[in-house]
């Protein structure tokens, strides 16, 4: 199934692309929503395909695609406000990477969660980084801990593989999070890392103050996302690869 990028506004000539697809804890979606609001980003494109569920979202009375791209002069965010069906993961991951490559994106940063069983005992979630090239350590510095061993499952795993294949630099940030509950605290930890990497100054205090409200508003998307993650065997991320043992 073809996935189409419908461009509504001119695409920046040089930019960094942040991906925020629904994942464990909805970490990326929550973080991206806060970034879009704080940085006052405008919609520049949206995605459409027969493989997507027949859904639109309404914002201030205006119908919008649930999967779209918003941007300012140097940063773009691709966000999905609905769970991505497991059968759409392969074409979507390939389409995103191919589009980014065609637009000469400097590098991509994907935002997600890393489910940990003792999340309720963690006050300050750690953020780990998966790099397609060791040279990217120069970009992240000491802002996040490089993930040395483990599994990545889902859309971001496919995007990492595709980026390595076509040599598009990509960073995946994974914050310790709940598996099945929206996690604004993990999203805030991710934004703090992005502040360092991208030289931003995005305040997360409001995000943390609205934590309970966000959890309530996001619970339905989380429930649908969890159902799709189970189909993808997302729980395998709890495991360690055999060669590590």
Image (cartoon, grey):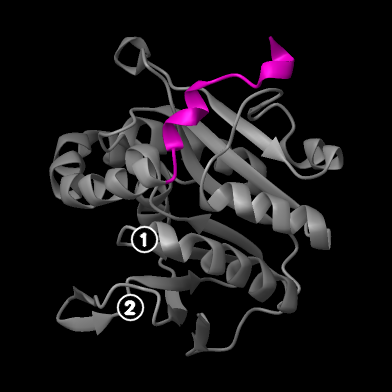
Residue 165, visible in the rendered structure: yes
Asked if the residue at tag 1 contacts the one at tag 2, i.e. Cβ–Cβ closer than 8 Å, the answer is no
At x 36% / y 60%, what residue is drawn?
85
Give the magenta part as a residue range.
Answer: 232-245
Mark 2 neighbour class, 10 Å CA radius: few under 14, some 14 to 19, many 20 or more: some
Q: Nearer the viewer, residue 115 or 27?
A: 115
Q: Is residue 87 left or right of residue 183?
A: right
Q: Give residue 241's quadrant in the image.
A: top right
Considering the image in quadrants, where does the C terminus appear? Answer: top right
At x 35% / y 41%, what residue is drawn?
230
Which residue is denoted by mark 2 in the rendering?
A: 65
Residue 79 image position (x, y, % from top left):
42, 62
Does the magenta-highlighted stretch encompass residue 120?
no
Q: Nearer the viewer, residue 241 or 144?
A: 241
Chain-order first, disc 2 or disc 1: 2
At x 73% / y 71%, what residue is drawn?
101
3D distance between C-alphas at marks 2 and 1: 15 Å
Q: Is residue 242 left or right of residue 166?
A: left
The tag on residue 85 is 1
């Amino acid at each position: 199934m073809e996935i189409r990028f419908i461009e509504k506004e001119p695409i920046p000539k040089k930019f960094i692309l942040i991906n925020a697809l629904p994942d464990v804890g909805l970490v990326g979606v929550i973080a991206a929503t806060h970034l879009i609001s704080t940085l006052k980003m405008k919609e520049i494109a949206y995605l459409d395909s027969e493989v997507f569920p027949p859904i639109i979202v309404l914002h201030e009375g205006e119908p919008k695609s649930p999967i779209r791209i918003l941007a300012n002069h140097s940063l773009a965010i691709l966000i999905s406000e609905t769970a991505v069906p497991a059968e759409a993961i392969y074409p979507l991951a390939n389409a995103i990477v191919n589009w980014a490559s065609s637009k000469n994106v400097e590098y991509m940063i994907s935002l997600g969660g890393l489910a940990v069983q003792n999340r309720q005992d963690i006050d300050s979630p750690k953020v780990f980084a998966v790099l397609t090239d060791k040279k990217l350590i120069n970009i992240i510095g000491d802002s996040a801990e490089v993930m040395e061993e483990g599994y990545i499952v889902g859309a971001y795993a496919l995007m990492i593989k595709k980026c390595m294949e076509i040599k598009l630099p990509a960073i995946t940030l994974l914050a310790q999070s709940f598996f099945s509950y929206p996690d604004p605290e993990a999203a805030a930890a991710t934004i703090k890392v992005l502040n360092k990497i991208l030289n931003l100054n995005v305040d997360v205090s409001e995000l943390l103050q609205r934590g309970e409200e966000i959890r309530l508003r996001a619970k339905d998307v989380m429930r649908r996302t969890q159902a799709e993650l189970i189909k993808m065997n997302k729980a395998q991320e709890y495991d360690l690869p055999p060669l590590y043992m």
